[in-house]
Image: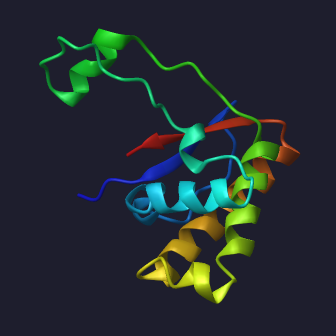
Amino acid sequence: MTVGFVPAFEPKIAASFEGDGASLFHHAATLDTIAEEHGLPLLTSFADDREPPPDFDGFPEELIEAIGPWTAWFSPTDGLRCVEGLLAALDEPRTRARVPMIGVLLDDLQALHRVLLVAKKRNARFRLEIA
Protein backbone atom coordinates (compact mmCIF):
# COMPACT_ATOMS: atom_id res chain seq x y z
CA MET A 1 0.00 0.00 0.00
CA THR A 2 1.27 3.45 -0.94
CA VAL A 3 1.05 6.39 1.43
CA GLY A 4 -0.06 9.69 -0.05
CA PHE A 5 -1.64 13.09 0.53
CA VAL A 6 -5.28 13.15 -0.56
CA PRO A 7 -7.68 16.07 -0.27
CA ALA A 8 -10.70 15.98 2.03
CA PHE A 9 -13.49 18.55 1.93
CA GLU A 10 -15.90 20.19 4.36
CA PRO A 11 -18.66 19.96 3.48
CA LYS A 12 -18.10 16.89 1.35
CA ILE A 13 -18.27 17.58 -2.37
CA ALA A 14 -18.99 15.35 -5.34
CA ALA A 15 -15.55 15.57 -6.91
CA SER A 16 -13.07 12.75 -6.96
CA PHE A 17 -9.33 13.20 -6.69
CA GLU A 18 -7.90 11.36 -9.70
CA GLY A 19 -4.38 11.10 -8.30
CA ASP A 20 -3.04 8.74 -5.69
CA GLY A 21 -1.20 11.47 -3.77
CA ALA A 22 1.91 9.35 -3.27
CA SER A 23 4.16 11.70 -5.22
CA LEU A 24 2.79 14.69 -3.29
CA PHE A 25 3.69 12.97 -0.03
CA HIS A 26 7.05 11.62 -1.24
CA HIS A 27 8.19 14.97 -2.68
CA ALA A 28 6.61 17.17 0.01
CA ALA A 29 9.93 18.52 1.29
CA THR A 30 11.11 19.43 -2.23
CA LEU A 31 7.75 20.98 -3.08
CA ASP A 32 7.83 23.01 0.14
CA THR A 33 11.33 24.27 -0.72
CA ILE A 34 10.16 25.27 -4.20
CA ALA A 35 7.07 26.93 -2.74
CA GLU A 36 9.18 28.85 -0.25
CA GLU A 37 11.55 30.02 -3.02
CA HIS A 38 8.55 31.35 -4.97
CA GLY A 39 6.73 32.95 -2.03
CA LEU A 40 3.90 30.40 -2.08
CA PRO A 41 2.03 28.69 0.75
CA LEU A 42 3.75 25.41 1.63
CA LEU A 43 1.99 22.25 0.48
CA THR A 44 2.45 20.71 3.92
CA SER A 45 0.75 23.71 5.55
CA PHE A 46 -2.53 22.11 4.43
CA ALA A 47 -1.75 18.82 6.23
CA ASP A 48 -1.77 17.85 9.90
CA ASP A 49 1.65 18.73 11.28
CA ARG A 50 0.95 18.10 14.96
CA GLU A 51 3.64 16.18 16.77
CA PRO A 52 2.81 13.14 18.90
CA PRO A 53 3.27 13.64 22.64
CA PRO A 54 6.86 12.89 23.74
CA ASP A 55 5.70 9.84 25.70
CA PHE A 56 3.56 8.38 22.88
CA ASP A 57 4.56 4.79 22.22
CA GLY A 58 1.56 3.43 20.34
CA PHE A 59 0.55 2.51 16.83
CA PRO A 60 -0.26 5.25 14.28
CA GLU A 61 -3.98 4.47 14.47
CA GLU A 62 -3.84 5.16 18.25
CA LEU A 63 -2.36 8.62 17.71
CA ILE A 64 -5.78 10.31 17.37
CA GLU A 65 -6.62 9.15 20.87
CA ALA A 66 -3.38 10.70 22.13
CA ILE A 67 -3.63 14.08 20.40
CA GLY A 68 -7.32 14.38 19.61
CA PRO A 69 -9.03 14.81 16.26
CA TRP A 70 -7.63 17.27 13.76
CA THR A 71 -10.17 20.00 13.08
CA ALA A 72 -8.29 22.40 10.78
CA TRP A 73 -9.72 23.28 7.35
CA PHE A 74 -8.28 25.62 4.73
CA SER A 75 -9.43 27.89 1.94
CA PRO A 76 -9.29 26.34 -1.53
CA THR A 77 -8.12 29.76 -2.76
CA ASP A 78 -4.94 29.34 -0.71
CA GLY A 79 -4.57 25.78 -1.94
CA LEU A 80 -4.97 26.92 -5.54
CA ARG A 81 -2.34 29.60 -5.03
CA CYS A 82 0.07 26.90 -3.82
CA VAL A 83 -0.74 24.35 -6.54
CA GLU A 84 -0.85 26.84 -9.43
CA GLY A 85 2.43 28.36 -8.27
CA LEU A 86 4.07 24.95 -8.02
CA LEU A 87 2.84 23.97 -11.48
CA ALA A 88 4.25 27.23 -12.91
CA ALA A 89 7.55 26.74 -11.08
CA LEU A 90 7.83 23.17 -12.35
CA ASP A 91 7.58 24.50 -15.92
CA GLU A 92 11.07 25.95 -15.38
CA PRO A 93 13.69 23.40 -16.57
CA ARG A 94 16.00 23.95 -13.56
CA THR A 95 13.18 23.45 -11.09
CA ARG A 96 11.80 20.50 -13.03
CA ALA A 97 15.20 18.78 -12.92
CA ARG A 98 15.07 18.73 -9.11
CA VAL A 99 12.20 16.25 -9.08
CA PRO A 100 12.64 12.67 -10.29
CA MET A 101 9.63 11.08 -12.01
CA ILE A 102 8.18 14.54 -12.65
CA GLY A 103 5.31 13.22 -14.77
CA VAL A 104 3.65 11.42 -11.86
CA LEU A 105 4.04 14.47 -9.63
CA LEU A 106 2.55 16.77 -12.26
CA ASP A 107 -0.40 14.38 -12.64
CA ASP A 108 -1.04 14.55 -8.88
CA LEU A 109 -0.72 18.35 -8.79
CA GLN A 110 -3.10 18.72 -11.75
CA ALA A 111 -5.59 16.33 -10.12
CA LEU A 112 -5.40 18.37 -6.91
CA HIS A 113 -5.88 21.56 -8.93
CA ARG A 114 -9.07 20.20 -10.52
CA VAL A 115 -10.72 19.27 -7.22
CA LEU A 116 -9.69 22.54 -5.58
CA LEU A 117 -11.44 24.42 -8.39
CA VAL A 118 -14.61 22.45 -7.64
CA ALA A 119 -14.21 23.11 -3.91
CA LYS A 120 -13.86 26.83 -4.53
CA LYS A 121 -17.04 26.91 -6.64
CA ARG A 122 -18.93 25.01 -3.94
CA ASN A 123 -17.53 27.05 -1.03
CA ALA A 124 -16.01 23.96 0.55
CA ARG A 125 -12.91 24.05 2.71
CA PHE A 126 -10.18 21.43 2.29
CA ARG A 127 -7.21 19.80 3.88
CA LEU A 128 -4.67 17.16 2.90
CA GLU A 129 -4.94 13.89 4.74
CA ILE A 130 -2.58 10.95 4.72
CA ALA A 131 -4.13 7.91 3.15
Image quadrant in which you'd find residue 64: top left
Residue name at image x 64 percent, y 77 percent: 90
Residue 29, compared with residue 110, is above or below; it is above
Q: Front-most of 27 and 119?
A: 27
Residue 54, compared with residue 97, is above or below; it is above
In the image, farthest residue toward the right: 121
Residue name at image x 66 percent, y 60 percent: 37
Residue name at image x 57 percent, y 82 percent: 96
Image quadrant in which you'd find residue 88: bottom right
Direction from residue 16 to residue 52 in the image, left or right: left
* Coordinates of residue 79 in the picture (x, y in percent): 72, 48
Query: Which color mode does the image show?
Result: rainbow
Looking at the figure, which quarter contains the N terminus?
Answer: bottom left
Q: Front-most of 122 and 91?
A: 91
Q: Front-most of 118 and 108?
A: 108
Residue name at image x 59 percent, y 49 percent: 43
Image quadrant in which you'd find residue 56: top left
In the image, farthest residue toward the left: 57
Direction from residue 97 to residue 88 in the image, left or right: right
* Coordinates of residue 66 in the picture (x, y in percent): 29, 10
Q: Front-most of 40 and 25?
A: 40
In the image, farthest residue toward the bottom: 93
* Coordinates of residue 26 in the picture (x, y in percent): 38, 60
Residue 62, compared with residue 55, is above or below; it is below
Labels in figure, total = 0
